[in-house]
Image: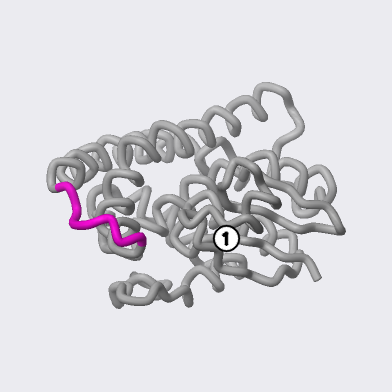
Amino acid sequence: MNRLFHSTLSPFCRKVRLVLAEKKIEVELIEEKYWEQTPDLLRRNPAGKVPVLRLDGKTLSESQAICELVEDLYPTPPLMPRAAEEKYEVRRLISWFDDKFYHEVTSKLLYERVHKKIQGLGYPDSKNVKTGAVRIKYHLDYLGWLLDQRRWLAGDAMTLADFAAAAHLSCLDYISDVDWNRNANVKDWYAKIKSRPCFRTLLVDQVPGFRPPAHYADLDF
């Protein structure tokens, strides 16, 4: 059995989950308390991070490396374009969300509101929460600008870039930190990707002590 060691509200784990589900690769999900840095986790990944994927007898780490390997091994349905410049745009946007968006928004909101409590690290830092709440508006506007020109984030077809963005936004939507009324294009795009079969397991996720809003699993939110 293939296994994915993950954390429910990790956007990096969710990106991998979306790719695996889209490719119809079945995996057993194993929740990992990565902050405890157990010997088993460090043996699977010396960096002490999730996700870690056990696939076809191989142990794989780092979310983007995992996603691109899965794409190479299981090219149907395709999540990367073939043209070099189009691949560049997909990778640029993935970096945008996994680096810039993560540090400016996800880490400020999700970490402060949820992960601190789960890990027993005290109360949210209100300054960080305020910063994240301000910065997400800029990123939603950027998404809207991209979608003014394109059907999907990186072009005319859905790609890994869409999964990277949706992974972050789905985590934040779980804690009601996305203003879906800010941009109609962004809301429509998210509704399309949220309605895909690969998204179903994300919509039934439950984090003890934190209930998602009613619209979280609503496909007509």
Where is residue 43 shown, x and y percent of the image? 69, 51
The residue type indicated by label 1 comes to: His
Where is residue 196 shown, x and y percent of the image? 57, 66
The residue lying toward the viewer, choosing from 16 and 39, is: 39
The residue lying toward the viewer, choosing from 36 and 111, is: 36
The residue located at (35%, 60%) in the rendering is 119
28 displayed left or right of 101? right
Residue identified by numbered label 1: 6
90 displayed left or right of 11? right
- Bounds of the magenta segment: 119-125
Given the current orientation, which residue lies at the most extreme front position?
A: 39
Mark 1 neighbour class, 10 Å CA radius: few under 14, some 14 to 19, many 20 or more: many
In the displayed structure, 175 sits above or below 13; it is: below
Where is residue 192 shown, x and y percent of the image? 49, 60
- What quarter of the picture does the C terminus occupy? bottom left
In the displayed structure, 218 sits above or below 102; it is: below
The residue located at (30%, 77%) in the rendering is 214
Give the image quarter of residue 54: bottom right
- What quarter of the picture does the N terminus occupy? bottom right
Label 1 secondary element? strand
Give the image quarter of residue 114: bottom left
The residue located at (47%, 46%) in the rendering is 165
